[in-house]
Image (cartoon, coloured by chain):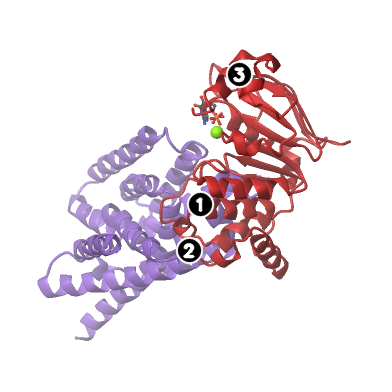
Amino acid sequence: MSDFFSLFFHSFIAVILLSIAVATIGSIMLLNRYSYTAASIAHGSYGGIGLALYFGVPMLLGTTLFALALALVLAAITYGNKERNDLLIGLIWAVGMSVGIIAVDASGGYGSDLMSFLFGDILMVPKSDLVYMALVDLLLIGFVALFYNHLLAIAYEEDFAKLRGINVKALHYATLLLIALTVVMSIRSVGLILVIALFSIPPFIAERFTHSLKAMIPLSGVLSFIFSLAGLLISYSFDISATASIILVSAAAFLISMIRKRE
Amino acid sequence: MKTAVKCDNLYFRYHKEYILENITLKIEDGEYIAIIGPNGGGKSTLLRLIMGLLKPTKGSIAIYGQSPQRAKRVIGYLPQKINFGLDMPITAFEAVLQGRLSGSKLFYDEEDKKTALRIMENLGVANYKDSKISELSGGERQKILLARALACDPKILILDEPTASVDIEGQKQIYEILKNLNMTKIVVSHDIKILFEGVDRVAYINRRLYMHDSPDLNIEHSEGHFCEMELFEYLKKGCDV
Ligand SMILES: Nc1ncnc2c1ncn2[C@@H]1O[C@H](COP(=O)(O)OP(=O)(O)O)[C@@H](O)[C@H]1O
Ligand SMILES: [Mg+2]
């Protein structure tokens, strides 16, 4: 019984830490339409997992470095060129995953773990990951608190932000690097495939019901927390995947919010 | 008299073809300039060059004698397109406050808030302070964006089609406000009938620039005035491009 409690306790902490990340970077991601780029970082990061396994580097370290490198490349590709780079973003996505698959194969015997990286397991988050998640959360909160007005100005209209002397380029790079860290922090809990859904849906719903980013961020966090907890509960009751349950709860809430808003 | 904007033999292209060619332009301090011309003619591009957001392919630009990069502070700007989704969570007051930002200013102080509010009051939009911008009408939103452009206390005001989605009544109000603002003004517009009452000169841009020194572009009497047939044809069509 105490085993179960400590297991669930870790998941509960993970849910809180994830919700904080969803609230902060998820909101910035949505307002700047970074979702596709973020998805590319997330999926491409599988390459980092594979290489870490192959070279025997600690998983978090290897994946972090690889994801940061991907984010830098994507930041360079997407800066000031919002429309015509879908092809390159998709290419990085595919190449990253392919590198991962080959490296995992080459390191042998880890094939059974693939699913756990793609979908995570919030009931099995190790303590070391919680520390990593907390550190990333602190970075995210600090970043958004400090640059709130600049980030909002860029999201609203980039030319005006540039004219006022805001360093749009530096903040673009910083945002994508933080998205990469957020992806890595979520690998073991919700996995690479679904992290983007979790990071998009609560901010998307919150955006529709708030007047200001100041309100959107906390509302996203609360929604994410509720969806995750409900997902966990469903997953526990019916013995199904926690990640899939969380995403389905979020998607159901998304549909309901669409209907309610249209009324 | 000081010269606010000076473009010398300016060329610009993104790719092979020039979008602007041989633009020579001098705008004096305090002048009110209207820019007209067909869509895709390069009006917004010229404004972005003047603001230092694009670099000329050839030629030079000076803003009060400085390079555009260094003169950004003195320019207030209302963009043609705002690239946000319908639900962008930003209040009118937050948008106006953005006019007070700078590279090193991360937070607003009391003075910023007072200034922003005063300008909103002057433009008659202070009561929308806490409204979500996307829920305002076109005219209200453009007045908010005008307040945002004015919030940095600019010497040059650059407005790119400020009344494109505004009803006639709102257009009149906005141009009335503009007439009474005391600074160098450069306004791109298709609403020539309303706009021309106040302006000093009119520039027509379609890859090249033709400056017309009299704002009297009354089409009935003007055939003889126009050395540029293209501009005449444009006006005759009523600028509906
Ligand atoms: N980022 C860009 N890359 C390539 N071409 C562009 C870009 N922005 C604008 N153009 C082109 O430059 C030309 C002039 O555009 P613009 O200055 O916006 O015209 P206007 O404001 O007079 O309607 C158009 O043909 C447009 O397609
Ligand atoms: Mg334009």
Q: Which mark is residue A155?
A: 1
For the view shown, which residue lies furthest in the bottom direction?
A1
**Which is more foreground, mark 3 or mark 1?**
3
For the view shown, which residue lies furthest in the right direction?
B1
Q: Colour of chain B?
A: red
Q: Is residue A49 left or right of residue A84?
A: left
Residue at (48, 36) in percent of width and height: A81
- Residue A148 in view of the camera: no
The residue to which callout 3 is attached is: B232
Q: Secondary structure at mark 1?
A: helix
Task: From the top left corner, tell me how far across and down residue A184 is, in percent.
Answer: 38, 56
> In terms of sequence position, does the residue under pointer 1 or pointer 2 come before the other?
1
Q: CA distance from mark 1 to mark 2?
A: 11 Å
- Residue B33 in view of the camera: yes
Foreground of the two, A152 or B125: B125
Check the residue under mark 3 and report the chain it is in.
B
Residue at (64, 31) in percent of width and height: B35
Q: Is residue B177 above or below residue B233?
A: below
Q: Is residue A49 left or right of residue B205?
A: left
